[in-house]
Image (cartoon, rainbow, N blue to C red):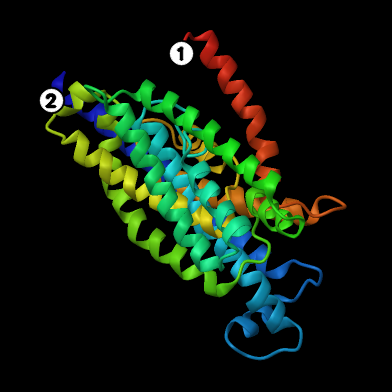
Amino acid sequence: MRNQSIAFIMAGRRQRRRRWILVTSLLAALACILCCAMLLLGNTIYPVKDVIRALSGEQLKGVSFAVNTVRLPRMLAGLFAGFAFGLAGYTFQTMLRNPLANPNVIGITSGSSAAAVFCIIVLHTSAAIVSVASVTAGLATVLFIYILSRGKAFSIGRLILIGIGIQAMLDAVISYLLLISAEQDIAAAIRWLAGSLNGSQMQQLPPLVIVVIICSPIVIVLGKHLSILELGEQSASTLGLNTDRTRIALIVSSVCMVAMATATTGPIAFVSFLSGPIAKRLVGVGSSNVIPAGLVGVNLVLAADLIGQFAFEYRFPVGIITGLLGAPYLIFLLIRMNRKGEL
């Protein structure tokens, strides 16, 4: 009987592992297809061989500029920002055991956005200074929220409520800055706040790429502890997990990625909110969904950007498309949580 139980458990683990590998592979393949589409499609559709020649460094009239200067930076920005948003959103939702606890809702991206808008409108700084200020403000915001939520003991509900309050305050600051800004500065700030891959430049991408390369392995390695943190503070401590150290490492890594992605592309709406639930639905329970959530984020950003460019008469920033996708899900989630008595 014992051997049968062990065999049954092992069979279930193998089945979940095969499903994880299959879903992750399909998501990676879809991301590759969307990356290729980003390079091929535009005002002019170039043949695959011409795009490959341009990427290899060969100078082709019209093709080299369009591919290397416009489309490649746009694609890379969407790739790394989408992965960062997806990874961070899943981490916060799982660690805090609440689907509403994502960087968009609890004020982290609002902190980065307020700093960026202040630099754009008031200080008129360069893009590099905007990036530094955005990352610094994101880290400062999450530190402030975390300190206020500690009290005598860490409270998830307190953190979410404080985060929502901080977000409302920072959104009011952003509105005030837009209200007092000069007319010529409003367009740049609004375009940035909408979340857009338009105007992405290769020289802006290294900080984002470096942060994602450094921080994402930390989140992936610590991702195995997320299921333990879901059990609650006391249970995780009983199992020997240093909850404070693990939570701080996950928060700092996730916030660095979100803040840098926000500084590069603006706060692309709902990507961090949608990636985790979609990945969990595809992969199922019993597996770490960190990598699938990151890939879902990539696919959401790239697909939304392509839709915004080519599906309508006018071109829309990627953040508007993801907002249209995410808002109905947020309403559905709130209704479901209210029915379950979780609100």
Q: Which residue corresponds to the image point at 35% horizontal and 38% vertical from the top-left?
A: 144
The disc, 1 or 2, on the residue closer to the chain's N-terminal end is 2
Q: Quadrant of residue 116?
A: bottom right
Q: Which residue corresponds to the image point at 70% horizontal and 58% vertical from the top-left?
A: 185
Q: Quadrant of residue 333?
A: top right
Location of residue 50 with respect to 97 vertically, above or below: below
Q: Nearer the viewer, residue 63 or 193?
A: 193
Amino acid type shown at disc 1: Glu
Q: Residues within 10 Å of mark 2 (few under 14, many from 20)?
A: few
Q: Nearer the viewer, residue 155 or 126?
A: 126
* Residue wearing tag 1: 342
Say what secondary structure mark 1 lies in.
Answer: loop
Residue farthest to the front? 180
Location of residue 285 with respect to 115 vertically, above or below: above
Q: Residue 98, how many percent across, how many down?
A: 42, 25
Q: Residue 168, how many percent across, how many down?
A: 55, 31
* Residue wearing tag 2: 238
Whether residue 238 sits left or right of residue 287 in the image: it is left
Q: Residue 32, how many percent across, how many down?
A: 56, 61
Amino acid type shown at disc 2: Thr
Whether residue 197 sits left or right of residue 82 in the image: it is right
Residue 289 visible at all: no
Residue farthest to the bottom? 59
